[in-house]
Image (cartoon, rainbow, N blue to C red):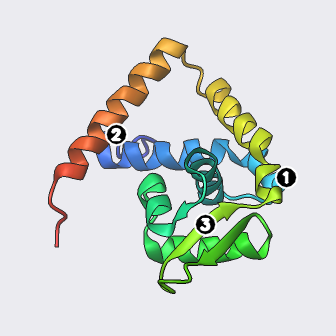
Amino acid sequence: MTDERVLDDLLCFDLYSLSRTVTGLYRPVLEPHGLTYPQYLVLVALTRLGPTSIGEIGRATRLDHGTLTPLLRRMADRGLVALERDAADRRAVTVSLTEAGEALRPVLHDAQCHLGEQLGLTETQLIRLQSSLHRLADHLDQLDPVS
């Protein structure tokens, strides 16, 4: 089969392909600052949540603990976030932005603006799309995970 759209009938492929493409649209804004897309998500979450637990960051970003822990360590090594263990419960870690992390706020804003420009949708279309995606995510969150 020579058709480039061999997988057009697979919704899962559409979602996967769009996710990769949209994530890639952030690259020109994030790469000059040495940031990856998952790091961007963590930084945005921290600007909105303030100092918080790893679990809260995981819920906000939908990144699992196995991905998030080494990611946060690398970000701490770069001086973007601070990781502080709770004195009463050594297992609990609070994550907060450092001055270097705070200094990236304009970059985070620029990344979001860049995406909006690249998508070529009106504000109304963006709002509808995001609303539909939120409904789908909420629905999927209610499903029992497949074992």
Identified at 49% across, 22% down, the residue is 126
Identified at 48% across, 42% down, the residue is 18
Residue 24 vs residue 97, the one in the foreground: 97
The kind of residue tagged 1 is Pro
> Badge 2: few (under 14), some or many (20 or more) residues near its Cα, within 10 Å?
few
The kind of residue tagged 2 is Asp
Identified at 53% across, 50% down, the residue is 20
Quarter residue 71 falls in: bottom right
How many marks the image carries: the answer is 3
Which numbered mark, 3 or 1, is in the foreground of this view?
Answer: 3
Q: CA distance from mark 3 to mark 1?
A: 24 Å
Decide if residue 72 is in sight here: yes
Percent position of residue 62, x then y: 43, 57
Percent position of residue 128, x then y: 39, 20
Q: CA distance from mark 2 to mark 1?
A: 34 Å
Looking at this rendering, what residue extends furthest in the front direction? 88
The kind of residue tagged 3 is Val
Q: CA distance from mark 2 to mark 3?
A: 42 Å
> Badge 1: few (under 14), some or many (20 or more) residues near its Cα, within 10 Å?
few
Which label belongs to residue 95? 3
Q: Is residue 86 above or below residue 50?
A: below
Query: Dividing the image into 4 quarters, which one contains the C terminus?
Result: bottom left
Name the element at disc 1.
Answer: helix
Name the element at disc 3.
Answer: strand
Q: Is residue 109 above or below residue 24?
A: above
* Pointer 1 residue: 32
Left/right placement of residue 99 relative to residue 11 reads: right
> Badge 3: few (under 14), some or many (20 or more) residues near its Cα, within 10 Å?
many
Name the element at disc 2.
Answer: loop
Percent position of residue 82, x then y: 70, 70
Q: Is residue 127 above or below residue 10?
A: above
Chain-order first, disc 2 or disc 3: 2
